């Protein structure tokens, strides 16, 4: 039987980061990937000859610079593309664009409301204040208030004192920020529907929460981790797409001695006295491991890899009640040329940040309500990323890729599955929404591919097609992620750790869950030696 | 009248139950107090009136869920005629197949019907109710007292003490408490129960009176909050003569303590001199003077309309104008020539609080409809048959049915005038699914739309609680940060209505706590 110090199930970015960290610390690491290639949702695929499009991953992602530095990714050629703040195109042909430069941004806002342009700096200041605090927590294990120790109690008292020492105004601002809906919070800064809709829309992309739902305002945070030019912060993506980052991370891992094995599906984990001992592969091989880390979502990790009866009863119930329900479908289009948008000025720079249609707040609320009701969206909110604008290498000359997030799309419909007819209807809706603003869109299409949440589950193993591996609503974040009592990447099973986005900090930062899980393992190891 | 005759120690604006209670506590402490109300009767939303001759009903508020025994004793309400017609009423979740789930108001819960719906639910009920009860108890410590005003008089021990209290809960319970705080009621219910009916009823309990649906994050906290308030009071109860009779009792108690009550006295302006509130002027020009003025009118209206924005700092004005009060409810009262026949009903059920909320999604859909300014397709509702406990409200053998429909839009698409009948029919049709002979027994009826409730009871936005009970408008932030201790930032002006801590409902707590704050802060007259 093969023996190794640590096995990581799943070669997503988190799995690779965890592998690299553990290997750096001298552990023998083996990464097992079910599919034929690494990268999971971030991997690119060829949509049409010469068109490399990201399969499903979301565009609004933050990769911590600390991690880039730790693995010297710059020397391996990691370059980030900066993209502007995106555009919202409204039904009546008006649009709102986001810019990183403060003056340009304020001028754009003033086109919609002078008052809002004045409110912008106040908004930026408040967002940065909240984001700074959250950012500081990304690369550490969450503090668990229920942990019974003198340290824990002391920590808790300290936190409580911190809270009460803040000024009432600060405390009130914090409370509002973490409890209000996007619509309510933004309404306290801005009056223009266009401004509110654009900011709310870009925060909601990828999340299963409506603009009117309390606590939704917290989704604004990740956007403000970077950028201090006073406008809408830059969005940064690696040159070559997420695939480039994945490739670099697997190179790093391999260079540190990590073995990455594809087409290796893990079917079972064997326990001895609540301790993870070894893994069984689909081909019958058994591998013994000191530590096992799972880069799969919490449900797949615990409910598929273990005998339920071997886990504590309450724990199984907690895990199975984690809200994990896909809300985003993705349609990728290969286009022979850039379609002409009637209402947008030619070459408008904000387009690099994406184009939203159907993102007015009322429409998003309705689409979300349809989703709650398991209906297909009659008028979805779509966010079109055009990666080829900043990175033409992704398509043949003149060609472009539209990678479209469609919200909110339920995993299952109230009256059955996503039949071919239903899918076709959804694609038609999308095409109509685009054609309305770009009449020649249909003529530009070379190839298209739609993936609804159910496809993401079938193809990539995301439970219920939820790309965030559990909703990122407050009750499932920080010490509540994935479930209360197991937020420190560990679980009731000794030596079995979670390192996927089902743990803190979820989709707030790429690779952070993996890095934190590895750090937690190394800590355990040190304390054992001592 | 001479000026001296209109000189008081304290003026209370608004003779709703909170105003009455605040005035009574002040008078009890020897303060010469006058209570002014713009309408021609006292009680505000606590009112009993005729639907048609000889059929009396509590027009608006129709149930007491948490009236504290302490206030009853302090103000000697029994002596002034308060008699409870029903106490610890059960809550009955109506089932189309007659398998109604009755949640007992007091004592051990019989889980046999729950088990008929879903065997697992009966097992989980103990765990659910124990946990909720524990959380409610923790919260209730902060609901029955004035909260420290953040920033001003918080000692450095307050925070750590609260943290220690939390720690005392025990690891498992603390974990689920922290998880429940930002959760939606639906996800909490999913964790414990399977049965649609039980979940529907608990979901309605969580959101009734709030502008939220059971899928809204934070709705689990609303549930705990209400349970917390309930811990401070007596169980679900109903006074003889209805809410109006209760108001009369409060009025008598107040007068016996020396409060001067003046109805038909519409305060038009709170007078300010040298940065101090010094009196009020009525619409007829009469002026009352007092160094202390308590307003049970919603804080936003009190400050911005009665006082005027120029007397407050910009930040305060901004806080006030931000207060959200968007939930609304409609009330339908029916006079019946006999009891409607509900399948499998016994005495217990007829005397209970009846809920129509067949599933969590049904409650959510009614909220979605309200948000869209639409009428719910399948309304959810809370009903009582007060005559079952108090037969004198109607002629012998006849009854009244009091129906509260939450999540009703304030401005309905098409206008209330157009859609009123449609709405009433919808509600009655819904009840008829459970009691098929209802229509046959209706003699008369009335319906109050949210705008009518607003104008009749002077509630802004038709909101019974003056302001949404959401995190940023509760506890030390109610009504606004910096004014949580009942004192407004204007010297001499206090709040004593549902717009301040601990919020709406027939609890009398804002009134009592406001009076206590005044007495503590102004030891001398």
Image (cartoon, coloured by chain):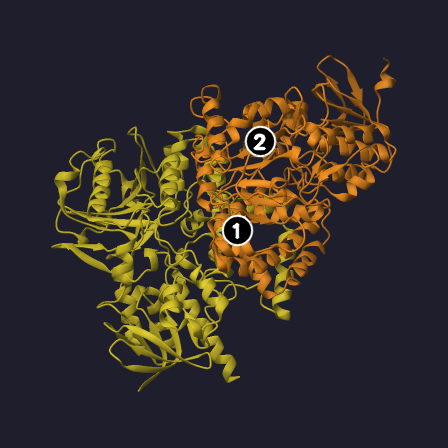
Quadrant of the rendered image containing residue B483: top right
Farthest-out residue, bottom: A1
State the mark number for residue B182: 1
Report x, y in % for residue A147.
Answer: 58, 67
Q: Is residue A369 left or right of residue A453?
A: right
State the mark number for residue B321: 2
- Foreground mark, 2 or 1, reads 1
Foreground of the two, B24 or A263:
B24
Chain identifier, orange in the render: B
Report x, y in % for residue B429.
Answer: 46, 31
Quadrant of the rendered image containing residue A344: top left
Would residue A134 be visible to someone looking at this image? no
Chain identifier, yellow in the render: A
Chain letter of the residue carrying label 1: B
Q: Is residue B34 left or right of residue B221?
A: right
State the mark number for residue B164: none
Residue drawn at the location 23% of the way across and 33% of the way down: A437
Q: Is residue A8 left or right of residue B3?
A: left
Report x, y in % for residue B340.
Answer: 56, 33
Estimate how packed mark 2 is, as few (under 14), some (14 to 19) or many (20 or more) residues with alpha carbons within 10 Å.
some
Q: Vertical placement of B5 versus A14: above or below?
A: above
Quadrant of the rendered image containing residue A380: top left
Foreground of the two, B294 or B420:
B420
């Amino acid at each position: 039987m093969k023996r190794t110090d640590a096995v990581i199930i799943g070669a997503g970015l988190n799995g690779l980061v965890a592998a690299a960290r553990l290997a750096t610390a001298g552990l023998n690491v083996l990464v097992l990937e079910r599919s034929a290639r690494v990268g999971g949702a971030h991997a690119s695929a060829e949509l049409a000859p010469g068109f490399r499009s990201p399969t499903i991953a979301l565009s609004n992602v933050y990769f911590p610079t600390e991690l880039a530095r730790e693995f010297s990714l710059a020397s391996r050629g990691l370059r980030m593309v900066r993209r502007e703040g995106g555009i919202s195109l409204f039904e009546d042909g008006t649009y709102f664009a986001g810019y990183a430069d403060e003056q340009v941004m304020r001028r754009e806002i003033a086109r919609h409301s002078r008052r809002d342009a004045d409110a912008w700096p106040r908004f930026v200041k408040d967002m940065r204040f909240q984001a700074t605090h959250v950012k500081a927590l990304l690369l550490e294990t969450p503090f668990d208030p229920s942990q019974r120790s003198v340290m824990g109690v002391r920590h808790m008292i300290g936190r409580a004192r911190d809270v009460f020492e803040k000024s009432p105004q600060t405390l009130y601002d914090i409370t509002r920020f973490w409890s209000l809906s996007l619509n309510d919070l933004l309404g306290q800064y801005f009056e223009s529907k266009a401004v509110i809709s654009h900011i709310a829309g870009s925060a909601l992309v990828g999340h299963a929460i409506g603009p009117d739902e309390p606590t939704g305002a917290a989704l604004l945070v990740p956007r403000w981790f970077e950028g201090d030019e006073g406008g809408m912060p830059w969005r940064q993506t690696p040159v070559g797409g997420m695939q480039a980052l994945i490739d670099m991370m697997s190179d790093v891992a391999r260079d540190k001695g990590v073995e990455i094995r594809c087409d290796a599906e893990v079917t079972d984990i064997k326990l001895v006295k609540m301790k993870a001992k070894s893994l069984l592969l689909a081909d019958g091989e058994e591998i013994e491991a000191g530590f096992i880390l799972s880069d799969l979502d919490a449900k797949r990790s615990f409910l598929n890899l273990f005998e339920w009866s071997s886990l504590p009863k309450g724990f199984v119930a907690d895990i199975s009640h984690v809200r994990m329900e896909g809300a985003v479908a993705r349609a990728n289009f290969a286009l022979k040329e850039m379609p002409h948008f009637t209402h947008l000025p030619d070459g408008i720079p904000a387009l690099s940040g994406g184009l939203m249609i159907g993102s007015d707040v009322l429409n998003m609320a309705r689409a979300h309500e349809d989703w709650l009701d398991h209906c297909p969206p009659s008028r979805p909110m779509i966010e079109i990323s055009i990666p080829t604008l900043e990175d033409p290498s992704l398509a043949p000359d003149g060609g472009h890729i539209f990678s479209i997030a469609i919200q909110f799309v339920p995993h299952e419909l109230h009256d059955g599955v996503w039949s071919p007819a239903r899918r076709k209807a959804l694609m038609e809706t999308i095409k109509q929404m685009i054609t309305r603003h770009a009449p020649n869109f249909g003529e530009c299409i070379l190839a298209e591919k739609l993936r609804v949440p159910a496809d993401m589950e079938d193809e990539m193993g995301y439970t219920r097609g939820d790309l965030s591996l559990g909703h990122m609503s407050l009750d499932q974040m920080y010490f509540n992620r994935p479930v209360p009592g197991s937020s420190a990447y560990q679980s009731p099973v000794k030596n079995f750790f979670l390192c996927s986005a089902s743990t803190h900090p979820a989709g707030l930062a790429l690779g952070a869950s993996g890095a934190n899980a590895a750090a937690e393992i190394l800590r355990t190891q040190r304390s054992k030696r001592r | 009248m001479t000026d001296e005759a209109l000189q008081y120690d304290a003026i209370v604006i608004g003779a709703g139950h909170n105003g009455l209670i605040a005035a009574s506590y002040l008078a009890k402490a020897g303060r010469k107090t006058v209570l002014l109300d713009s309408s021609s009767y006292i009680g505000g939303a606590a009112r009993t009136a005729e639907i048609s001759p000889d059929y009396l009903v509590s027009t608006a508020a129709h149930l007491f869920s948490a009236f504290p025994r302490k206030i009853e004793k302090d103000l000697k309400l029994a002596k002034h005629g308060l008699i409870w017609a029903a106490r610890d009423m059960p809550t009955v979740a109506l089932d189309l197949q007659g398998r109604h789930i009755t949640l007992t108001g007091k004592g051990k819960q019989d889980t046999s019907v729950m088990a008929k719906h879903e065997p697992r639910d009966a097992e989980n009920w103990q765990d659910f109710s124990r946990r909720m009860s524990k959380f409610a108890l923790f919260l209730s410590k902060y609901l029955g007292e004035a909260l420290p005003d953040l920033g001003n008089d918080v000692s450095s021990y307050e925070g750590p003490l609260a943290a220690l209290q939390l720690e005392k809960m025990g690891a498992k319970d603390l974990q689920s408490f922290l998880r429940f705080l930002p959760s939606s009621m639906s996800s909490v219910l999913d964790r414990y129960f399977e049965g649609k009916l039980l979940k529907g009823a608990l979901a309605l309990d969580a959101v009734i009176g709030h502008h939220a649906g059971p899928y809204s994050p934070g709705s689990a906290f609303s549930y705990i909050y209400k349970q917390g308030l309930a811990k401070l009071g007596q169980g679900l109860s109903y006074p003889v003569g209805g809410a109006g009779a209760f108001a009369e009792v409060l009025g008598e108690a107040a007068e016996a303590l020396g409060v001067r009550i003046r109805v038909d006295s519409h305060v038009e302006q709170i007078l300010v001199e040298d940065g101090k509130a010094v009196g009020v002027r009525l619409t007829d020009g009469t002026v009352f003077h007092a160094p202390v003025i308590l307003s049970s009118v919603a804080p936003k209206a009190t400050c911005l309309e009665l006082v005027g924005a120029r007397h407050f700092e910009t930040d305060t004005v901004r806080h006030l104008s931000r207060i959200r009060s968007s939930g609304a409810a409609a009330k339908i009262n029916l006079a019946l020539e006999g009891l409607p026949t509900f399948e499998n009903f016994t005495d217990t059920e007829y005397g209970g609080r009846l809920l129509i909320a067949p599933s969590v999604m049904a409650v959510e859909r009614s909220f979605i409809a309200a948000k869209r300014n639409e009428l719910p397709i399948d309304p959810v509702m809370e009903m009582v048959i007060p005559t079952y406990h108090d037969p004198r409200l109607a002629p012998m053998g006849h009854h009244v049915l009091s129906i509260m429909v939450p999540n009703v839009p304030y401005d309905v698409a098409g206008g209330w005038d157009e859609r009123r009948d449609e709405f009433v029919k919808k509600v009655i049709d819904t009840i008829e699914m459970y009691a098929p002979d209802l229509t046959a027994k209706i003699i008369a009826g009335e319906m109050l739309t949210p705008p009518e409730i607003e104008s009749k009871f002077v509630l802004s936005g038709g909101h019974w609680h003056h302001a949404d009970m959401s995190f940023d408008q509760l506890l030390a932030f109610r009504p606004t940060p910096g004014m949580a201790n009942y004192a407004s930032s204007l010297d001499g002006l206090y709040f004593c209505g549902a717009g301040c801590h601990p919020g709406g409902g027939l609890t009398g707590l804002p009134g009592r706590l406001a009076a206590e704050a005044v007495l503590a802060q102004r030891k001398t007259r």
